[in-house]
Image (cartoon, rainbow, N blue to C red):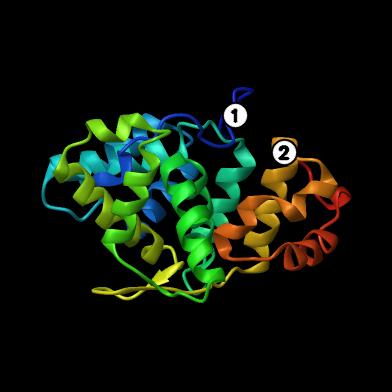
Amino acid sequence: MLPATSTTRWRTTGAYTPINASKAGLLYETRCWITYYVQSGDSQKTREALVNGILPQRSRETRRTIVTVIQQRLQRWFPPQWVYEDLWSFAEDEHQPSLKTSLLLHVVRQDHLLYDFVQQIVVSSWEQGERVLTRADVQRFLDLAAAEHAETERWSHATREKLAGNVLSILRDYGLLSGREQKYIVEPIVPTAVVNHLIRLLRAEGIEEEAIPYHPDWRIWLWSSQRAEQAVAAFPPHEITL
């Protein structure tokens, strides 16, 4: 059984960081990490197993970097045990988009830069009927963000270029964008179990029940508050244990 913690940090705030400049979605690798970690309950053993051979990449250093990125995305916020158990159930069903849709939620919530990009650029473009996104859109977002996030001005040109590419690739890997050379905004498929997962997250985070349908997290999936209201009504508080 995984250890419980009382230091859960439900979402990342504060300074922007370029942590996603190194890797994109890593869907297969994350599935491997979740499966091994939930079964073993040991972070270090999971890291060693993936670095020492479970992951297919030829370079040991690459495998080490991949595991570090996954741990940053899924462990540093100290989620409660039920979050990992949900992710495990999503990872086991390879015929549904549950895992990638839930990772879209978690990876965005745990990266302040990525969260703001989705809310300010992706959602805004979608609502205005614009569907194409490019690296230039990410670069413009960073330029405008510099007024409040001066830390971005210290990043090298190469870091910004890698970050711009990976921001789009992550969102594509997790189902919010499609395409390779040119990225298009698409509404992700969200299975009911993943919808309920978000409701549990918001309730556990302490969001007032009446405010849950209007929380901006729903916009990560391009959902309206009306659609969220229906989902919340179908999953009342007495049906869950946080």
- Residue 215 lies, with reference to residue 154, above or below; the image says below
Q: Residue furthest left?
A: 59
User: Which quadrant holds residue 45?
Assistant: top left
The residue closer to the viewer here, 167 or 39, is 167
The residue under the point 15% across, 43% down is 157
What's the amino acid at mark 1?
Answer: Thr
For the N terminus, the image quarter is top right
Q: Is residue 169 visible?
A: yes
Q: Residue furthest top?
A: 6
The reply to whether callout 2 and callout 1 are in contact (CB within 8 Å) is: yes
Left or right of 117, for residue 140: left
How many dots with numbers? 2
Disc number for residue 8: 1
The residue under the point 76% across, 50% down is 212
Residue 136 x, y percent position in the rendering: 27, 60
Q: Provide the secondary structure element on which disc 1 rests.
A: loop
Residue 146 x, y percent position in the rendering: 35, 37
The residue closer to the viewer here, 194 or 117, is 117
Q: Which of disc 1 and disc 2 is earlier in sequence?
A: 1
Disc 1 residue crowd, few under 14, some 14–19, many 20+, Cα 10 Å: some
What's the amino acid at mark 2?
Answer: Ala
The residue closer to the viewer here, 151 or 73, is 151
Q: CA distance from mark 2 to mark 1?
A: 10 Å
Q: Provide the secondary structure element on which disc 2 rests.
A: helix
Pointer 2 residue: 204
- Residue 238 lies, with reference to residue 242, above or below; the image says below
Disc number for residue 85: none
Residue 190 x, y percent position in the rendering: 59, 68
Q: Is residue 92 visible?
A: no
Disc 2 residue crowd, few under 14, some 14–19, many 20+, Cα 10 Å: some
The residue closer to the viewer here, 228 or 16, is 16
